[in-house]
Image (cartoon, coloured by chain):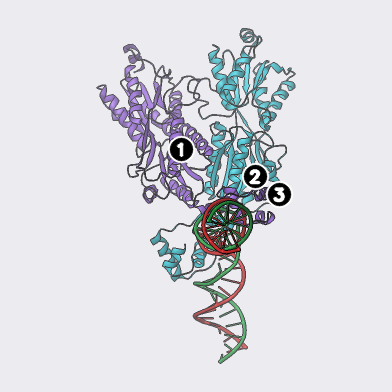
Chain colours: A purple, B cyan, C green, D red
DNA sequence: TGACACATTCGAAACGTTTAGATTAGCGTC
DNA sequence: GACGCTAATCTAAACGTTTCGAATGTGTCA
């Protein structure tokens, strides 16, 4: 900027004023400055600017795994929203590990991000302190946190699973296996409640042997399914509360020589673009990823626009049961066949 | 840092020296400073540091669409690699649009990223100038650029498609539809050559009516497939050169009332985690996403470590044909049935 | 005792902006 | 012609670090 100022024979203050529109600059100087900028190929150094104005127009986004299609989609939407608003997004993957998450958040905070969107993992960590300090606004995504009271957008997970399991019950299923992730994050906790309540509402027993948990990965879904399928009285349907794990479920069903939906019905959380193209077409609980991403971005953008004092806002969106053909109705005959 | 210095009754220079290990600090002062840092909860301001040292330990990454599973995986790998090296990653999606890409790159450059990994779109734009200025190192990912001579890691696309199409020919297919993206990016260009050469090597004619192109989206694949399937002499196999588009291909096949592989064989580029779980299990060309991501990150990290003068390095990796059951052998009888 | 080397520590000038407040010029008014 | 007002421009002090070179103190050796 100094060079530009010299070339245009003005002060740096005038150049800055012109660039920021903070003061009126005469036509003549405007002309000279713009010429100098072109000649020199000057680009404003946003780092120096950030240091002075105390804002980086950059936000941090952490998710457990970007390869989980739910997060892929949400990240995509969030990125677009911030892009439109002129913000850059720093992306971090925490790999479902609390220490990693804390490191990533520190990294982001070091770089003076203006705000944070966090699909948190585990409980505890430095997040609580950051929210309490209230220096940088935080929006929780997908996963609430008991101890952290801040803006959030989540799904009504309990209701979504309740509906899905109730659907299975209406089809005639009585023994419904349930595969969950670790229950220290709110969606898994809430989904589990939805499962139990659906059974109870239908007067069915909650059988602990039908509930298996894993660490969100395909292999965990595979192992859990293997266990369920080797029960002496195996379930006629399986609901997987996590998307990557359902791949494992399908592989286990295949490897054990069964087929879906003939031998076992399957439903799961999160929709895929290809859900209705391949066989079986999976019945899923679709999350409104577009809305989730946009709302999360909007909550943060609103804080960044200066609305700091409003009390924390929690947005709860509804899932949608996408009924396809991976769950089959169970008549008395069918039941005895598959049992 | 000023506050820390005051609290510890030392100069800021000493605090800085301790933090950076650039000079030896006596045990006593070290103790006092560390205590002060804890008391105050001091965090070093990386923005101010960046301004002074001229480096941000941040890199920019642009991809056309993060929802394309190939890019999802590669982004994930790259993010992890830079995370390990203590770098933050700013992610941008260019939506296959050159202007958007240019804006994103400017945004990243404004923020003084130390380097750039670009899965470019279109040709031209500001990339060429940036590489020539050589201020920030650039690594091209997946897509080469005639006019831009810099580090790159790409697939041997021509060979990969040659192998896949040759496989189809060996199965007995003679009329093989080909669906490509816009040919202004190198992979599409090279894959097309692979297709043509495979046909020629087998003494088969290259029929232009069997070649359709679209803009990388599912809907484009759908339309292209619809066109191919309504030819009076329709192909017995379709190869889709782009992953999202193959979803459209499958939907078109379904909507038109045909089935794969009975009526039409399908193969495509890029593997999915679920490729071998659902029916039909797609035959695909798998890219070594892990290697691609790591190599790209390594090329850039090497430049960032100071190796600026080495000539541009082009890494070409091999694809792998994953043969599953979405392509069926075509005997004379089968051929007449499907024709 | 003075000179010298060495280890610590410090003062102050950068880095490239923004911005508050000072200065200057131009103009109308009385 | 002095005065005040406005508009345009400038000067200089930040922002929070790093880093160069100087200053200080301590011990060693001739």
**What chain does badge 3 belong to?**
A
Q: Return the x and y of residue B178 as percentages of the image width and height.
A: 65, 21
Q: Element under label 2? A: strand
Q: Return the x and y of residue B33 as percentages of the image width and height.
A: 44, 66
Return the residue at label 3: A39
Which image quadrant for residue B191?
top right
Which image quadrant for residue A312?
top left
Q: CA distance from mark 3 to mark 2?
A: 24 Å
- Where is the C terminus of chain B found, in terms of image quarters? top right
Q: Nearer the viewer, residue A107 or A264?
A: A107
Q: Residue at x 41, y 64 (%)?
A: B36
Q: CA distance from mark 3 to mark 1?
A: 38 Å
Q: Residue C12, relative to residue B206: is it above or below?
A: below
Is disc 3 in the same subunit as disc 2? no
Q: CA distance from mark 2 to mark 1?
A: 30 Å
Which image quadrant for residue B194?
top right
Return the residue at label 1: A297
**Which residue sits furthest left?**
A203
């Amino acid at each position: 900027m100094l060079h530009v100022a010299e070339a245009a024979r003005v002060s740096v203050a005038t150049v800055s004023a012109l660039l920021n529109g903070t003061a009126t600059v005469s036509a003549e100087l405007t002309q000279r400055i713009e010429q100098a900028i072109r000649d020199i190929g000057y680009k404003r150094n946003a780092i120096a600017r950030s240091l002075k104005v105390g804002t980086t127009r950059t936000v941090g986004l952490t998710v457990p795994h970007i390869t989980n299609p739910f997060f892929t989609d949400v990240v995509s939407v969030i990125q677009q929203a911030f892009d439109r608003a002129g913000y850059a997004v720093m992306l971090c993957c925490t790999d479902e590990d609390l220490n990693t998450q804390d490191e990533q958040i520190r990294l982001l905070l070091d770089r003076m991000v203006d705000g944070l969107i966090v699909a948190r993992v585990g409980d505890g960590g430095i997040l609580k302190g950051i929210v309490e300090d209230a220096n940088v606004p935080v929006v929780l995504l997908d996963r609430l946190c008991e101890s952290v009271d801040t803006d959030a957008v989540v799904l009504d997970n309990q209701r979504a699973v309740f509906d899905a399991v109730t659907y299975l019950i209406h089809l005639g299923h009585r023994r419904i296996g349930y595969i969950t992730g670790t229950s220290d994050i709110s969606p898994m906790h809430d989904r589990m409640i939805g499962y139990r309540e659906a059974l109870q509402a239908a007067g069915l027993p909650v059988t602990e042997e039908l509930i298996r948990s894993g660490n969100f990965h395909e292999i965990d879904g595979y192992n859990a399914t293997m266990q369920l399928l080797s029960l002496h009285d195996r379930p006629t349907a399986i609901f997987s509360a996590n998307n990557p794990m359902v791949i494992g479920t399908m592989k286990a069903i295949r490897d054990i020589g069964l087929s879906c939906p003939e031998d076992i019905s399957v439903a799961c959380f999160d929709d895929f673009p290809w859900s209705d193209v391949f066989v079986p077409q999976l019945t899923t609980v679709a999350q409104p990823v577009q809305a989730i991403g946009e709302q999360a971005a909007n909550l943060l953008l609103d804080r960044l626009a200066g609305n700091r004092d409003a009390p924390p806002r929690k947005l709860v969106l509804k899932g949608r049961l996408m009924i396809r053909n991976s769950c089959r109705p169970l008549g008395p005959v069918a039941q005895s066949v598959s049992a």
